[in-house]
Image (cartoon, rainbow, N blue to C red):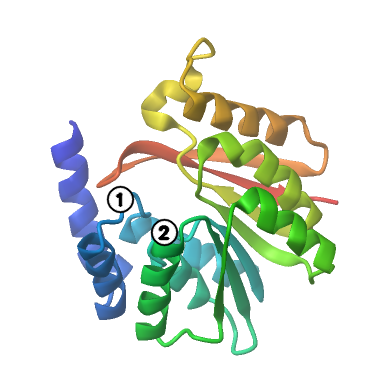
Amino acid sequence: MGQAQWTEVDAFLSSLIVGEDEALTEATAAAGRAGLPPISVSAAQGKLLYLLAKTLGARRILEIGTLGGYSAIWMARALPADGHLISLEYSPRHAEVASGNIARAGLVGTVEIRVGAAGETLPKLVAEGTEPFDMVFIDADKGGYPNYLDRALELTRPGSLIVADNVVRGGAVADGLSRDPNVQGVRSYLEKVAANPRLEGTVVQTVGVKGYDGLSIARVTS
C-alpha cells in the first residue's frame, strides 16, 4: 500500500460521497493556471472542514492561509445566511486568485480576505475587539503555528474549534531531533495544545491524494 493506492481510494471516495462541484473544481484549476502551489486541502478534507463547521453551528470562521480560496469555499458554505469568514493571506497574488474563485462560488459578502503577514493581521483583529470566532483553521507557514495558536485563543470562546493542517509531515513530527523548521513549528504547536489547560485536542493522521499527513483538532474549553 502506498501513494498510488491512497490516491485511487481518495478519488473513489470523493466521487462517491464528497460531492465536489464545478465551483470547487474550477477553484483548483484556476489556482493551477495561476501557478499557485498545489498544497490546498483535498476534496475529502474540505468536506471534513465543512462538516465540522456545520456540526458546530459556526457563524464566524477565521482562516489563516487562503491560498486559492478552496478551503474557504468549503467552510463558508457551512455558514448561515448571516455568517462571516475572514481569511488571512500573505500573498497579494494568492488573494487575487482566491477572490475570483470566491466570487464564482457566489460567496462575495460572506468571505472577507485580508492581505498581509498573519503575524501583523492577527494582532489587528485582536485590537479591533472583533466578535469571537466559532472555528479557526490554520493552514499557513508552519513556523508561525505556535504564534497563530496564541492569537487564536484570544479570538475564540469556550466551545470553539481550532484546526491545524499538515501537522504530521509524513511522519517527521515524531522526530524530536529534526532540524526542519516546519517540523519544529508543528511540534511546538502540538506541545502548546497539549500543555494548555484551556484546550482539549487530538491529531487525526490522514493518507490520500495529499500523501501522509494529519490534522490537529482542539476544542477551547474555557
- Name the side, left or right, on which 130 lies relative to 66: right
State which quadrant residue 58 falls in: bottom right
* 157 over 96 or under it: above or below: above
Q: Given the image, on which type of amino acid does mark 2 rest? A: Leu
Which of 85/80 is in front? 85
Label whose residue precedes the other's in the sequence (2 or 1): 1
CA separation, marks 2 and 1? 8 Å
* 146 over 218 or under it: above or below: above
Q: Tell me which residue sits at (46%, 57%) in the image.
A: 91
Residue 168, position in %: x, y? 45, 32
Q: Secondary structure at mark 2?
A: loop
Q: How many marks?
A: 2
Q: Given the image, on which type of amino acid does mark 1 rest? A: Pro
Report the disc number at residue 150. none
Circle 2 packing at 10 Å, graded few (<14), some (14-19), many (20+), is many
Which residue reaches farthest top?
177
Name the residue carrying label 2.
Answer: 67
* Residues at marks 2 and 1 touching, judged by CB atoms closer than 8 Å: yes
- Name the side, left or right, on which 208 lies relative to 202: left
Q: Tell me which residue sits at (65%, 88%) in the image.
A: 82
Name the residue carrying label 1.
Answer: 37
State which quadrant residue 3 falls in: top left
Residue 58 visible (yes or no): no
Residue 196 visible (yes or no): yes
Residue 124, position in %: x, y? 75, 61
Residue 212, position in %: x, y? 33, 35
Quarter occupied by the N terminus: top left
Q: Tell me which residue sits at (29%, 44%) in the image.
A: 210
Circle 1 packing at 10 Å, graded few (<14), some (14-19), many (20+), is few
Q: Tell me which residue sits at (46%, 21%) in the image.
A: 180
